[in-house]
Image (cartoon, grey):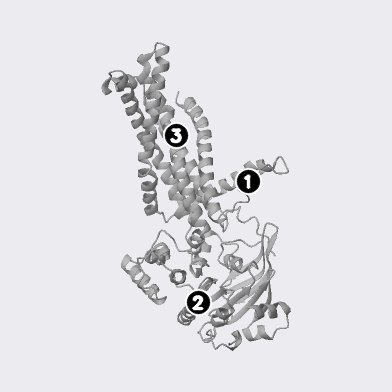
């Protein structure tokens, strides 16, 4: 008799990872042992790592699912564009109004365009994009894959000898990684544009003057690293949403839990990743 | 009113008559154990299915019938024991090799599990698009039409799964399962949730497909009449193990209390 309990961890013949417990429920309920939630978190993190490895293995070996990738680029990118642009625009207006009030108090009103440009392209644009996409796309992917899981559609894909890691997870994660920087550009542009409009309504200022003053001291190091760091946000959002969706159980309630946990966890990890990435950018692109 | 053993039924084709070599089993399950947490589902089950033969697996709900099918196609991993498909143990296989084995197997899920974002024709074309890339689009379309005609669904190509009945979904699921011309067919509750007429139609369809394709099949069912109709042998499961295995007549003659109770209530 051969014991095969560890074959799945070794990556041989892997069925989809089943949750031992829901992370959300395990975090909200304290078990008899104080180490319970910690060990469950570590278990979840380990399963996430195995899932990531399987997706990478599936993504780099042919056949490649280009059609599904383009469909996801449209679904995640084009469909998110209006929401991201709107969020960026609202943030630009708020930043403009707040910065004007603060800078006027300290007699530095002339720095307003530069302050707005730097805050939008360095931090506000990327993080707003990350959070908006994690809300819209994270919930969408989590719910879609969870629904497929509970109706055995993912099992049917596996039974047809097609890897769900290759067909479902890899194109979604890759699409998230590719579109986040582009959406960030849209958020930056709409934020700066509406920031200028908010300023121009209070005090006459041409767009040309605003751009000249705002981008005067800005270089590529101010623009490229913060924009491309959102690829890491895309990885986090796609990975967590696919993982939570594809391991769900328990019918409609499970679908709801998967959607919620996808949004909560991806938003949380985007914020945590931002802390680390900002520090790294400051070190490597001073 | 006729009792179930008095109803005249069509019979499954004997594997020898189907022209298959019945010496080597197509499916051999040996001493299989599977637990979910503390719940033991399969407790050392052993079964064999010869090429061209149909085995019906019966039993109460929760006795591990569907788990047995999922283990057979590699959707679950056994705790111990072996599953051999045409002599090859699937438990130690990598993804590519397991994929090769799965391509020889068709699986009809209990609720059909059609892809809800694809229409009927696209559902059936799915395995062809991924594994018969050498086929042109028109060849694939012809094959899809032929498969749907075999299951009597040729007039519903463009319908979405949500727009057709449960029985029709099962037919489409069956067509999808047959797309790669498998030599093993696994059917999970093919008649569950269907009215008697639709159940009879599905049974007739399975019999017809067996006659045409000569596949080894495992049918998991609660429906004793259906099992009698489409299977050469029946296996009755209780508490994760096979209580009795044989023809319907052999089950009827059994003195085992659980067997008598099960047949009496069916």
In which chain is the residue bearing label 2? B
**Is A199 drawn above or below residue B32 in the view shown?**
above
- Per the image, the residue denoted by label 2 is B199
Using the rendered image of the protein, determine whether residue A56 is visible from the camera's viewpoint: no
Pointers 3 and 1 in contact (C-beta within 8 Å): no
Q: Which residue is mark 1?
A: A43
> Can residue A103 be seen by looking at this rendering?
yes
Task: Give me the residue at 36% from left, 31% from top.
Answer: A89
* For residue A120, above or below residue B27: above
Quarter of the view holding residue B59:
bottom right
The answer for how far apart the CA atoms under marks 3 and 2 are is 57 Å
| Dot 1 alpha-carbon crowd within 10 angstroms: few under 14, some 14 to 19, many 20 or more | some
Q: Left or right of B157: which side holds B228?
A: right
Q: Are marks 2 and 1 on the same chain?
A: no
Subunit of label 3? A
Above or below: residue A68 compared with residue B146: above
Subunit ID for the residue under disc 1: A
Q: Position of residue A271 (x, y in %)?
A: 51, 34
User: Comparing marks 3 and 2, which lies closer to the viewer?
Assistant: 2
Please name the residue that numbered disc 3 is placed on. A229
């Amino acid at each position: 008799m051969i014991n095969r309990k560890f074959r799945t961890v070794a990556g041989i013949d892997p069925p989809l990872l089943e949750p031992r417990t829901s992370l959300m429920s395990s975090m909200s309920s304290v078990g008899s042992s104080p180490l319970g939630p910690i060990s469950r978190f570590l278990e979840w993190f380990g399963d996430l790592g195995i899932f990531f490895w399987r997706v990478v293995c599936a993504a780099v070996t042919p056949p490649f699912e280009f059609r599904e990738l383009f469909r996801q680029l449209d679904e995640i990118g084009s469909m998110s564009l209006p929401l991201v642009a709107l969020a960026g625009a609202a943030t630009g207006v708020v930043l403009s109004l707040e910065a004007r009030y603060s800078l006027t108090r300290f007699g530095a009103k002339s720095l307003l365009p530069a302050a707005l440009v730097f805050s939008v392209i360095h931090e506000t644009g990327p993080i707003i994009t990350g959070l908006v996409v994690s809300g819209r796309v994270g919930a969408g992917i989590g719910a879609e894959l969870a629904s497929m899981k509970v109706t055995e559609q993912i099992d049917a894909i596996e039974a047809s000898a097609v890897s769900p890691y290759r067909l479902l997870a890899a194109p979604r994660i890759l699409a998230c990684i590719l579109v986040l920087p582009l959406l960030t550009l849209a958020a930056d542009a709409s934020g700066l544009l509406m920031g200028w409009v908010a300023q121009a309504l209070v005090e006459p200022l041409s767009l040309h003057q605003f751009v000249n003053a705002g981008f005067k001291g800005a270089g590529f190091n101010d623009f490229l690293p913060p924009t491309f760091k959102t690829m890491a946000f895309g990885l986090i959002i796609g990975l967590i949403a696919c993982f939570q969706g594809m391991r769900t159980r328990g019918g409609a309630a499970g679908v709801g839990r998967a959607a919620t946990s996808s949004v909560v966890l991806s938003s949380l990890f985007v914020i945590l990743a931002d802390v680390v990435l900002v520090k790294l950018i400051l070190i490597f692109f001073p | 009113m006729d009792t179930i053993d008095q109803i005249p039924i069509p019979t499954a084709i004997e594997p020898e008559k189907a022209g298959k070599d019945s010496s080597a089993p197509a499916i051999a399950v040996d001493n299989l154990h599977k637990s979910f947490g503390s719940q033991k589902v399969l407790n050392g089950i052993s079964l064999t299915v010869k090429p061209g033969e149909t085995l019906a697996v019966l039993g109460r709900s929760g006795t591990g019938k569907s788990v047995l099918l999922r283990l057979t196609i590699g959707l679950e991993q056994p705790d111990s024991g072996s599953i051999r498909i045409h002599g090859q143990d699937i438990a130690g296989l990598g993804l590519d090799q397991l994929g090769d084995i799965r391509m020889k197997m068709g699986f009809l899920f209990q609720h059909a599990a059609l892809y809800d974002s694809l229409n009927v024709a696209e559902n059936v074309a799915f395995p062809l698009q991924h594994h018969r890339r050498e086929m042109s689009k028109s060849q694939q379309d012809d094959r899809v039409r032929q498969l749907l005609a075999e299951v009597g669904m040729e007039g519903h190509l463009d319908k979405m799964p949500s727009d057709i009945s449960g029985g029709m979904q099962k037919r489409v699921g069956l067509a999808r399962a047959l797309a790669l011309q498998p030599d093993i067919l696994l059917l999970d509750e093919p008649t569950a949730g269907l009215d008697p007429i639709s159940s009879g139609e599905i049974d007739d369809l399975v019999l017809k497909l067996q006659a045409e394709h000569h596949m080894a099949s495992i049918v998991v069912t609660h429906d004793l009449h259906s099992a009698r109709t489409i299977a050469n042998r029946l296996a009755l499961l209780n508490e994760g193990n096979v209580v009795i295995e044989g023809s319907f007549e052999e089950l009827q003659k059994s003195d085992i209390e659980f067997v008598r109770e099960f047949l009496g209530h069916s």
